[in-house]
Image (spheres, helix red, strand yellow):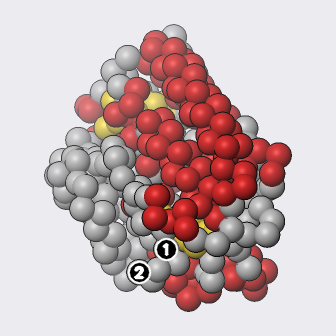
Amino acid sequence: MTSRFLPCALGASLLALPAFADVPRVTTDLPVTQSLVAQVMGDLGTPEVLLGQGADPHHAQLRPSQARALSGAGLVVWVGEGLSPWLEGPVETLATGSVLELAAVEGLTVQGFQASSLLGEGEDDDDHDHDHDHDHHDEDGHDHSGQDPHLWLAPENAALWLNAIATALSTLDPEHAAQYAANAETAVAGVLQTRDEVAAILAPVGDAGLVMFHDAYGYFASSFGLNILGTISEGDAAAPGAARLTTLRAALDGAGAVCLFPEANHPLDFAQVVVEGGSVRLGAPLDPAGVMLEPGAALYGDLMRGLATAIAACATQG
């Protein structure tokens, strides 16, 4: 990792770096990342987002305009290659400014992917793996081991990210450091308020058995006490095979599953096949990365409340 990459703990030594003449141009990877950065930047600027609406965070291709956004950014903020392996090479080779990898921020609550009680799958890693080892994707991107990279679904992680973003921006633009810090403080309070709202929405769900499209919801489940029994997909939103769908369908009722949730940017067919003819309800499509939402500062709160509302609406049906 080169010197232009901001380290996990953004120390006082970085404040000696020269300031930009203007507010840094910021490029982000995902809509949810863009939302957090937008909250910290406030009226000072609008961060760009690479991932287009409806695209898959795990599998995408960089367009020429996106490559230019990377190379022209004073600061690139991304979750990390554990979530978006397709972006690792471009960030390493094209980004000429500073880079903040959010998955490497110190103090995060980190866990591995969840085991599936539906299929008797075991955990591949310890629940709290802090070594930040990202080399867990196989050639097809379907490997399911290692650290769960969907870190923003734990509100406490999002709060840490906001402060890290403010520090990174202040390092590059000390003239506006006070404003970044104030914006981050307000944004953290908003995240914690969202956490309380989500907890209230999900309270009636209790331990109802839930099945998701892919294993993106471990932090959300840990934060709010949800009972996720398993997933349709084996890996990072990879299409499931016919044998897996058949096995899932046979296992649902015996496992106490109540609701199964597709995802907003994936075919509904897989979920429909699994629930067809059974008692498990089909919930509304979920959007864990906010790829179907309008980008902007409000997206993070909308994303979290949207997940909670959809889950509660299905799980609490009479």
Relative to 308, residue 235 above or below: below
| Label 1: element kind | loop
Q: How dense is the environment of label 2, judged by Cα within 10 Å: few (below 14), some, or many (20 and up)?
A: few
- Of the residues shown, which amino acid type is indicated by label 2? Met
Identify the residue at image location x=58%, y=71%: 17
User: Percent x, y for residue 53?
Assistant: 73, 59
User: Percent x, y for residue 109?
Assistant: 33, 44
User: Percent x, y for residue 110?
Assistant: 31, 48
Instruction: Decide if residue 55 is on the left or right side of residue 224.
Output: right
| Label 2: element kind | loop
- Label 2 and label 1: CA atoms lie apart by 7 Å
Q: Is residue 129 visible?
A: yes
Identify the residue at image location x=45%, y=51%: 150
Q: Considering the image in quadrants, where does the N terminus appear?
A: bottom left
Q: Label 2: which residue? A: 1
Relative to 105, residue 202 above or below: above
Instruction: Decide if residue 271 is on the left or right side of residue 178.
Output: left
Are circles 2 and 1 on residues that touch, CB within 8 Å? yes
- Of the residues shown, which amino acid type is indicated by label 1? Phe
Among the 4 quarters of the image, the one containing residue 50 = bottom right
The front one of 29 and 188 is 188
Instruction: Decide if residue 71 is on the left or right side of residue 9.
Output: right
Q: Is residue 165 visible?
A: no
Among the 4 quarters of the image, the one containing residue 287 = top right
Number of the label disc, if any, that sits on residue 135: none
The front one of 179 and 78 is 179
Q: How dense is the environment of label 1, judged by Cα within 10 Å: few (below 14), some, or many (20 and up)?
A: some
Instruction: Decide if residue 174 is on the left or right side of residue 148.
Output: right
Identify the residue at image location x=60%, y=34%: 185
Q: Label 1: which residue? A: 5
Identify the residue at image location x=17%, y=51%: 126
